[in-house]
Image (cartoon, coloured by chain):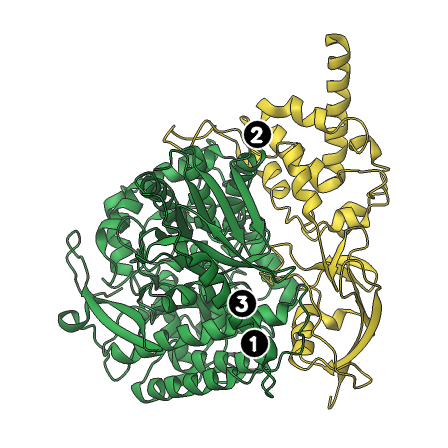
Chain colours: A yellow, B green
């Protein structure tokens, strides 16, 4: 089709404290185009639909193959990865907004460092003795690997946190991604040694109890990680740990 | 002399994080700089696996065989001692990664599983599904987060390296970097600096590389006097998914697990792939290379695909594409071993590769050349180290699949301790104003760029650069176009002086950062084009039809480029082939 175009409504914000505003763009359609390739085309000629010169849209991106987790944003109302969102599958105008529950840096770029702080708080690592040669790791059955591998595919995009009704600065809820990582590390034979500390970190305000079982997390996860399974698994473990702690004290 | 030296590591991919872990373990303090959250580094894109001669399949594999495959695969351009060191350490590194919790695929007995990869006849590649790079990076990222929580590592994420700070003796004393949020230019002192900034894919416009892989940091150092080696050695991966914004990798593991490359024998055959009978398909790799079949090294497979498409005119639908077929393999096996890459194809193309053969074509993938390093990962600048894809070592003229992840970790494991040892023997820095001077130089560069008011759009210059380099400096090279390429690069550099930024603000200005990188890309492109022009032979990924043979007498030499009077100046250094005697490369 000749002169086929795609229209975008993009929510923009120049600085963290400044007011947001909307701009519309219209660019030529290309086969196989996705949201990132569209933003690249806009940068090549940053002029709004009304013909006003503007700045290229700022957004996070890196791998462009949905594995680095950078380019998460709200596209037509839904939290998703911009690189793997194909334009042909979207209604127009395509609406792009930054995540609403993270501080905006500029335009579609937000600060998601809270997730990495949460991972620190739950000690999301295997406590190895050192990097010197200590022989092979623990044996694991293929069945065990098939449980841990999907959990380990979390790309830290934070879609699950954005979509969660409980995740906000008020609740301080850690969110599904961190809880699922706790499950991952607590099932590893060496990772287990920090199990109690991880579960303790998920108790109390902002902990796993904040989860309202809305199940939005699992719905938006671009990697199909069984987040609700992880939440119920870790919930039980936290409960067990709380009871054990009660009798210990 | 510092007992607990301060080391700066630039880049948070596998190589950088490996170095960080070693330094922290030795008691050093690390400042880690990255343009993205380190967990989002390009290493996550590596798919198929990581090589180590663990010999867990009863095949008689050995580290000596790994060494032989690697230097033969690299067409005898790699200095051999560091290759041997890497191959020897590889099995221990796999054990360490296993202990760090990498969810490698397992055998029934619970041991690590290994698969075939290109350029070897052994099952030598450990893997975690088809997202091995992601899994390895996460394991190292977690260990670094642990050190960060202990206060041994400080991360500077969303910061871009601009240049090294060199003292009056020419030694590296720190770096100059820019905060990609506030755009502020700041200098940071350190006892030593390690570069781990990856490949240069962006120079070719569309490649399998991530957005940050511009080579800008390496180029900045080259312009400061660092030697850049084997720049002309660029790997074009045979199987990528063509796309609007990038070429997405389709892992060699697809062929490692039995995937077959073919085209219809009849030009322009309109039938659906699966309805074309077996005897009307041409499995050209299997026919031309009966021993290695679909698992010939990447340079060989890429040239074969070019030949079929451009000489035999047998591209699928008359387009530059061939089939990569997995449909004969059991779905369960595919899901267990290759799910990550099948998912990428499904999401970006829309077809299920379990049912329909994939359409693929070669794409720029890996930078074999890089900052010249000695056998201890030291550059020619004292106090400056390099490791991973940004250094020139290990892979020679062609990298074997699944050797990159190992070389990144190995390089980091050498560079980390070496930098600490260097720092411990370092005399106190002379306060000679180098920091203030370097900061001033970079700020002036920025001001010039912001004030520039010509008519050039940096993204358009970049698109021209990519098309030029892909056309003339990838799979097939001729001298005349290479000469024209350099002339055109000079023209693009001149046009860069007339860039008009569409964004002149000083907050998270990605256009401004990109325009800066573009200048460095253009400078480094000249090293690639001129290096290719000089090398009148064919070796590994470097193929000149006018000089079709490898010429060991004249060209078994490392290309070393220095920035002199605004242009590359070349030296050539004989390759150390003391361990494996060069022989003709015939697969």
Subunit that carries the residue with mark 3: B
Of badges 3 and 2, the one in the foreground is 3
Place of residue B276 in the rendered image (x, y in percent of width and height, measured from the top left): 53, 74
User: Which quadrant would the N terminus of chain A be assigned to in this image?
Assistant: bottom right
Q: Is there a contact, CB below 8 Å, between mark 3 and mark 1?
A: no
At 84% from the left and 69% from the top, the residue drawn is A21
The Cα atoms of the two marked residues, 3 and 2, are separated by: 49 Å
Residue B34 visible (yes or no): yes
Place of residue B196 in the rendered image (x, y in percent of width and height, measured from the top left): 43, 54
**Nearest to the observer: residue A120 or residue B23:** B23
Residue B386 vertical position relative to residue A234 in the rendered view, above or below: below
Q: Outermost residue, front direction?
A: B432
Of badges 3 and 1, the one in the foreground is 3
Q: Which mark is residue B443?
A: 3
User: Which quadrant would the C terminus of chain A be assigned to in this image?
Assistant: top right
What element does badge 2 sit on? loop
Side of A227 relative to B85 (left or right) = right
Residue on which disc 2 sits? A188
At 77% from the left and 46% from the top, the residue drawn is A161
Residue on which disc 1 sits? B449
Local crowd size for mark 3, using a 10 Å CA cut-off: few (<14), some (14–19), many (≥20): some
**Nearest to the observer: residue B208 or residue A21:** A21
Q: Which mark is residue A180?
A: none
How many tags in the picture? 3
Local crowd size for mark 1, using a 10 Å CA cut-off: few (<14), some (14–19), many (≥20): many
Subunit that carries the residue with mark 2: A
Residues beneath discs 3 and 2 located on the same chain: no
């Amino acid at each position: 089709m000749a002169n086929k175009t795609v229209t975008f409504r993009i929510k923009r914000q120049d600085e963290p404290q400044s007011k947001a505003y909307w701009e519309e763009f219209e660019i030529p359609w290309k086969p196989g185009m996705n949201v990132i390739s569209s933003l690249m085309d806009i940068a090549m000629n940053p002029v709004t639909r009304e013909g006003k010169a503007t700045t290229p849209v700022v957004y996070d991106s890196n791998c462009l193959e949905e594995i680095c987790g950078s380019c998460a944003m709200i596209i037509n109302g839904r939290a998703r990865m911009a690189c793997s969102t194909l334009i042909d599958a979207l209604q127009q105008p395509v609406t792009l907004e930054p995540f609403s529950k993270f501080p905006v840096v500029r335009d579609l770029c937000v600060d998601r460092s809270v997730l990495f702080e949460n991972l620190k708080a739950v000690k999301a690592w295997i406590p190895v003795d050192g990097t010197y040669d200590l022989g092979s790791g623990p044996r694991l059955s293929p069945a065990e690997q098939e449980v841990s591998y999907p959990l380990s595919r979390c790309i830290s995009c934070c879609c699950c946190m954005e979509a969660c009704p409980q995740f906000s600065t008020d609740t301080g809820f850690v969110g599904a991604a961190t809880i699922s990582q706790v499950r991952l590390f607590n099932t590893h034979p060496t990772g287990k040694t920090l199990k109690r500390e991880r579960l303790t970190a998920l108790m109390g305000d902002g902990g796993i109890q904040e989860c309202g079982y809305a199940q939005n997390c699992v719905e938006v996860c671009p990697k199909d990680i069984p987040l609700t399974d992880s939440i119920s698994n870790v919930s039980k473990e936290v409960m067990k740990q709380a009871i054990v702690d009660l009798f210990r004290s | 002399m510092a007992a607990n030296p301060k080391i700066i590591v630039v880049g948070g991919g596998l190589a950088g994080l490996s170095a960080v872990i070693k330094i922290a373990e030795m008691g050093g303090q690390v400042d880690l700089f990255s343009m993205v959250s380190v967990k989002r580094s390009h290493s996550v894109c590596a798919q198929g696996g990581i090589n180590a001669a663990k010999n867990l399949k009863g095949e008689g594999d050995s580290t000596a065989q790994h060494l032989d495959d690697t230097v033969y695969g690299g067409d005898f351009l790699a200095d051999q001692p560091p290759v041997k060191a890497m191959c020897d350490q590889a099995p221990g590194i796999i054990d360490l990664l296993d202990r760090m919790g990498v969810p490698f695929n397992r055998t029934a007995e619970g041991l690590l599983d290994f698969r075939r990869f290109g350029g070897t006849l052994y099952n030598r590649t450990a893997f975690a599904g088809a997202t091995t790079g992601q899994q390895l990076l996460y394991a190292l990222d977690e260990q670094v987060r642990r050190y960060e929580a202990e206060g041994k590592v400080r991360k500077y994420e969303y910061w871009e390296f601009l240049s090294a700070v060199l003292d009056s003796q020419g030694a590296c004393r720190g770096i100059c970097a820019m905060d990609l949020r506030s755009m502020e230019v700041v200098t940071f002192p350190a006892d030593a600096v390690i570069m781990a900034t990856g490949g240069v894919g962006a120079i070719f416009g569309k490649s399998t590389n991530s957005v940050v892989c511009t080579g800008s940091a390496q180029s900045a150092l080259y312009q400061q006097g660092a030697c850049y080696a084997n720049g002309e050695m660029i790997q074009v991966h045979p199987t990528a998914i063509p796309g609007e914004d990038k070429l997405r990798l389709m892992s060699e593991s697809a062929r490692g697990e039995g995937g077959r490359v073919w085209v219809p024998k009849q030009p322009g055959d309109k039938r659906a792939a699966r309805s074309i009978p077996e005897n009307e398909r041409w499995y050209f790799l299997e026919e031309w290379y009966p021993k290695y079949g679909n698992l010939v090294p990447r340079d060989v497979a890429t040239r074969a695909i070019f030949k079929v498409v451009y000489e035999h005119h047998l591209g699928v639908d008359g387009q530059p594409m061939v089939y990569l077929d997995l449909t004969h393999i059991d779905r369960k096996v595919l899901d267990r071993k290759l799910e990550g890459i099948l998912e990428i194809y499904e999401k970006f193309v829309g077809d299920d590769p379990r049912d329909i053969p994939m359409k693929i074509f070669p794409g720029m993938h890996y930078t074999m050349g890089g900052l010249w390093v000695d056998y201890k990962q030291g550059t020619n600048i004292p106090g400056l180290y390099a490791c991973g894809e940004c250094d020139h070592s290990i892979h020679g003229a062609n990298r074997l699949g699944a050797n990159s992840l190992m070389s990144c970790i190995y390089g980091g494991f050498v560079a980390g301790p070496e930098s600490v040892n260097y720092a411990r023997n370092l005399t106190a820095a002379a306060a000679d104003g180098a920091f203030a001077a370097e900061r001033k130089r970079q700020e002036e560069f920025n001001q010039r760029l912001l004030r520039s008011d010509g008519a050039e759009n940096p993204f358009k210059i970049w698109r021209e650069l990519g098309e030029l380099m892909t056309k003339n400096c990838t799979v097939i090279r001729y001298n005349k176009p290479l000469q024209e390429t350099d002339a055109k690069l000079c023209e693009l550099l001149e046009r860069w002086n007339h860039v008009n930024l569409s964004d002149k603000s000083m907050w998270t200005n990605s256009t401004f950062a990109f325009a800066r990188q573009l200048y460095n890309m253009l400078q480094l492109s000249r090293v690639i084009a001129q290096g290719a022009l000089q090398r009148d032979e064919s070796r590994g990924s470097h193929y000149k039809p006018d000089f079709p043979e490898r010429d060991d007498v004249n060209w078994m030499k490392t290309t070393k480029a220095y920035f002199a009077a605004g242009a590359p100046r070349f030296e050539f250094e004989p390759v150390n082939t003391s361990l494996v005697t060069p022989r003709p490369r015939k697969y």
